[in-house]
């Protein structure tokens, strides 16, 4: 009797339906997602390899970039393989525990990325506005504290999602119109009030808004300092470095913004648009980040070129 009640309260598994309305195109949709995922793997692993092997890149800016690459690998790997399994092999079933784990890691890595972007903005602010004190401010101890904040804040914010889902009964509802498990998608399957889930979800989103405000403020101060530099070469170098960071932030926040807006307010928008935007949100930034840094950051670009020349 206990096992029956438990099964009714929490189903043993969920069925991820993929992209409703585009089932016949799943096989073809998977191809660009697979290419993008492989590009993300190669690009982020290349960034990590270059930073690890090149001693001249053992600097705070590149430590944070390495952490961004690890976060990108985590975010894409926690979603895309299952997504491809759904599209190509119809592997739609995911265990209840597996679904909770996927939800946790998706929100954890997403949150880590936003805080990392704040940390990277702070790093550029110190480097450009206080260059003589850069090494004194960003010591190994400070870097350790910042990394702890990146991980710790998101552990504190994301862990309650798991317990908020565990408290909900599902009454046998197992069909989820999505390619991966996320908090509100799971909560909406429940047969109980989810007001607490909605309020807490908005609270977490408000933290991301705060992150965006901090990033914007940092770059306004950075730009003000840049245009006060006496040398044009120094201005161009600073703008080039900041340009890489700004491109990465646009790649992350633009699909996230559209995904959030359509999810909350786009009631007349077809469901498959919601799902496609949510998918782009987890695959586009991890793919573009290493490309942007590889192309725009001279130190990384030179090291990658050197590796290929040595192989030839």
Image (tube, rainbow, N blue to C red):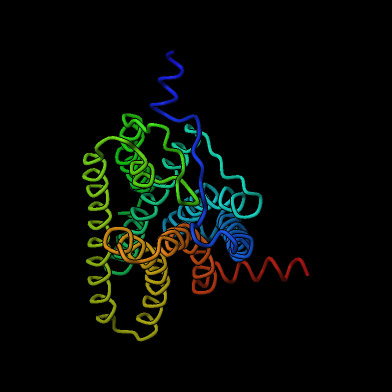
Q: Name the residue nearer the viewer: 167 or 5.
A: 5
In the orientation shown, which residue stands out farthest toward the bottom?
A: 232
Residue 46 seen = no
Q: Name the residue nearer the viewer: 52 or 38.
A: 38
Q: Quadrant of residue 236?
A: bottom left
Q: Does residue 86 sit above or below 158 in this rendering?
A: below
Q: Position of residue 23 (x, y in %)?
A: 56, 59
Residue 219 seen = yes
Residue appearing at x 35%, y 81% in the figure: 235
Q: Quadrant of residue 108?
A: top left
In the image, 129: left or right of 186? left
Residue appearing at x 33%, y 44% in the figure: 188
In the image, 302: left or right of 310? left
Q: Name the residue nearer the viewer: 2 or 214.
A: 2
Which image quarter holds the C terminus?
bottom right
Q: Name the residue nearer the viewer: 300 or 159.
A: 159
Which image quarter holds the N terminus?
top left
Q: Position of residue 9 (x, y in %)?
A: 38, 26
Residue appearing at x 39%, y 65% in the figure: 270
Residue appearing at x 36%, y 68% in the figure: 254
Tell how many labels.
0
Q: Quadrant of residue 267?
A: bottom left
Q: Position of residue 260 (x, y in %)?
A: 32, 60
Q: Does residue 3 sit above or below 64 in this rendering?
A: above
Q: Position of residue 177 (x, y in %)?
A: 45, 51
């Amino acid at each position: 009797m206990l096992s029956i009640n438990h099964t009714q309260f929490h189903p043993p598994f969920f069925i991820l339906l993929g992209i409703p309305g585009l089932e016949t195109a799943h096989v073809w949709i998977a191809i660009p997602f697979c290419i993008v995922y492989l590009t993300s793997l190669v690009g982020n692993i290349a960034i990590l390899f270059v930073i690890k092997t090149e001693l001249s890149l053992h600097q705070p800016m590149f430590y944070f970039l390495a952490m961004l690459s690890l976060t990108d690998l985590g975010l894409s790997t926690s979603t895309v393989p299952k997504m491809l399994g759904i599209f190509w092999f119809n592997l739609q079933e995911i265990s209840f525990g597996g679904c909770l784990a996927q939800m946790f890691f998706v929100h954890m890595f997403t949150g880590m990325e936003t805080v990392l972007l704040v940390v990277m903005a702070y790093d550029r602010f110190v480097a450009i506005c206080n260059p003589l004190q850069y090494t004194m401010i960003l010591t190994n101890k400070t870097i350790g504290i910042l990394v702890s904040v990146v991980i710790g804040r998101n552990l504190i914010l994301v862990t309650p999602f798991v317990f908020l889902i565990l408290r909900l009964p599902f009454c046998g509802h197992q069909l989820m119109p999505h390619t991966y498990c996320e908090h509100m998608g799971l909560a909406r399957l429940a047969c109980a009030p989810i007001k607490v889930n909605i309020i807490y979800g908005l609270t977490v989103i408000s933290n991301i808004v705060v992150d965006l405000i901090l990033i914007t403020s940092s770059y306004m101060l950075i730009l003000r300092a840049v245009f006060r530099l006496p040398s044009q070469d120094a201005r161009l170098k600073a703008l080039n470095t900041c340009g890489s960071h700004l491109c990465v932030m646009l790649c992350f926040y633009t699909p996230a913004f559209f995904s959030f807006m359509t999810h909350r307010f786009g009631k007349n928008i077809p469901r498959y648009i919601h799902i496609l935007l949510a998918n782009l949100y987890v695959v586009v930034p991890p793919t573009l980040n290493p490309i942007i840094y590889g192309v725009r950051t001279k130190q990384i670009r030179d090291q990658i070129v050197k590796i290929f020349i040595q192989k030839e």
